[in-house]
Amino acid sequence: MINNKEIFETIQMINQQHLDVRTTTLGISLLDCICDSPKATAQKVYDKVTRAGKNLVQTANDLASELGIPIVNKRVSVTPVSLITANNGGHLEVIKALDMAANEIGIDFLGGYSALVHKGMTPYEEQFIRSIPEALSITSKVCSSVNIGTTRAGINMDAVALMGKIIRECAERTADNDSIACAKLVVFCNAVEDNPFMAGAFHGIGENDLTLHVGVSGPGVVKHALESVHGDLNMVAEKIKETAFKITRIGGLVCQETARRLGVNPGIVDLSLAPTPVMGDSVAHILEEIGLESVGACGTTACLAMLNDAVKKGGIMAASNVGGLSGAFIPVSEDAGMIKACAEGKLTIEKLEAMTCVCSVGLDMIAIPGDTPAEVISGIIADEAAIGMVNVKTTAVRLIPVIGKGVGDYAEFGGLLGHAPIIPVNTCSPLKFISRGGRIPAPLHSHKN
């Protein structure tokens, strides 16, 4: 039974501590849209997305008004497009149809211009990946992802080498807008099929035809809760667990009710603490409340490991189905504390990489010099993929080489994507390593059958 104290607490979380449901994401299968003709496939894709998603925005807005809980983003994810267009090569027709559909139903983003090439690439998949820069530069709401490795398969280094070049081309095609196309492209290791967050969301082939996933967020709530904790780290962890439980209950309610009203299957609640550029809504500030002078200080990785574990332990008891990425996000441009620490030189890309060993996803929304070579970008992708492969976790890279800008400059992305100081990267060349190609074999512990 919910009592008056819990109601008052929730009101405070929303009004003063930036609690929100970060996204409701409707997953739509496009498998039944496959035709021999690119034009026919694109038309079926447009028709299904507009039909299935026509009430998503209004339903989320109505529910937000009734419950008094902000639902910030309304999104759609679809079956990886490379699977839908493999028989007819109509990926560019489909991407245009998806962008038109996204605009028609009024959503914020649509994810799924994606390819799964963790073990190898077919000639068509390589062609598809090479189309990503054009696709992201001619559309406004479509996001893309490529899975280049898994714990079970190893890392496809041919795909890693290619993605360094693709990221550079995305940057160059949108150089007049701080290389914004790169903010809509994620390179994964161990990608998951039920992720509600952009830019990496896609609707997995093991999902239902239509599924509603929810991503909750509440860094400000956790930070506020810790302000009253003066005991040891056991007490800190308990408070985080207690707070994550309350946040996740809200997400579970929104997931079930939104799915019911839309007449679709309820999916998962993603427990991730997703920050925003707004002051008071920062994962970095949680770590500093626990006791760091600044995020990036010695002890940051240990502190983040405790936070991530406590969030999962608290949240997993509050929802019937937990999934997605579930943990603490550290996207630099979207976190006021991370932005400040990077600008002051207290948080480096090497420290961010170490932090990704223990938290959700990976090197996210990091602006780097526009003249960074493609092979260096590929080297960063390979390092991050290795962390995911060996640790049996999802890792990702969303780097933005901002054309025409260097260390000390800022890139402006707008909205929840925020802004970021351009930080240095190690430019010692990994070209020979990257050029070898082939596949890094799966680790020994992948053989569990």
Image: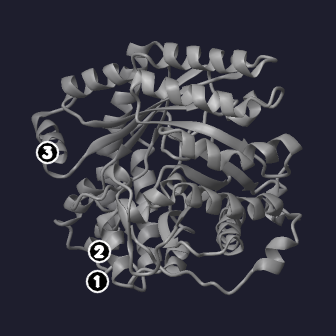
Between discs 2 and 1, the one toward the N terminus: 2
Secondary structure, mark 3, is helix
Residue drawn at point x = 20 percent, y = 25 percent:
65
Between discs 3 and 2, the one toward the N terminus: 3
Q: CA distance from mark 3 to mark 2?
A: 23 Å
Q: Which of the pair 380/328 is nearer the observer?
A: 380
Q: CA distance from mark 1 to mark 3?
A: 28 Å
Q: Can you give x and y, in whole percent of width and height, for residue 215 in the image?
A: 42, 41
> Going by the image, does 398 lie left or right of 441?
left
Tag 2 residue: 288
Please identify the quadrant where the N terminus is shown: top left
**Callout 2: 10 Å neighbours few (<14), some, many (20+)?**
some
In the image, what residue type sits under mark 3?
A: Asn
Residue 10 in view, yes or no:
yes
Q: Can you give x and y, in whole percent of width and height, for residue 442 in the image?
A: 83, 62
Q: Which of the pair 288/8 is nearer the observer?
A: 288
Residue drawn at point x = 46 percent, y = 55 percent:
327
Between discs 1 and 3, the one toward the N terminus: 3
Residue drawn at point x = 70 percent, y = 30 percent:
205
Secondary structure, mark 1, is loop
Colour theme: one colour
Q: Which of the pair 353/80 is nearer the observer?
A: 80
* Residue 37 drawn above or below residue 239: above
Residue 235 in view, yes or no:
no
In the image, what residue type sits under mark 1?
A: Glu
Q: Which mark is residue 293?
A: 1
Contact flag, marks 2 and 1 (Cβ < 8 Å): yes
* Residue 374 drawn above or below residue 251: below
Q: How many marks?
A: 3
Tag 3 residue: 15
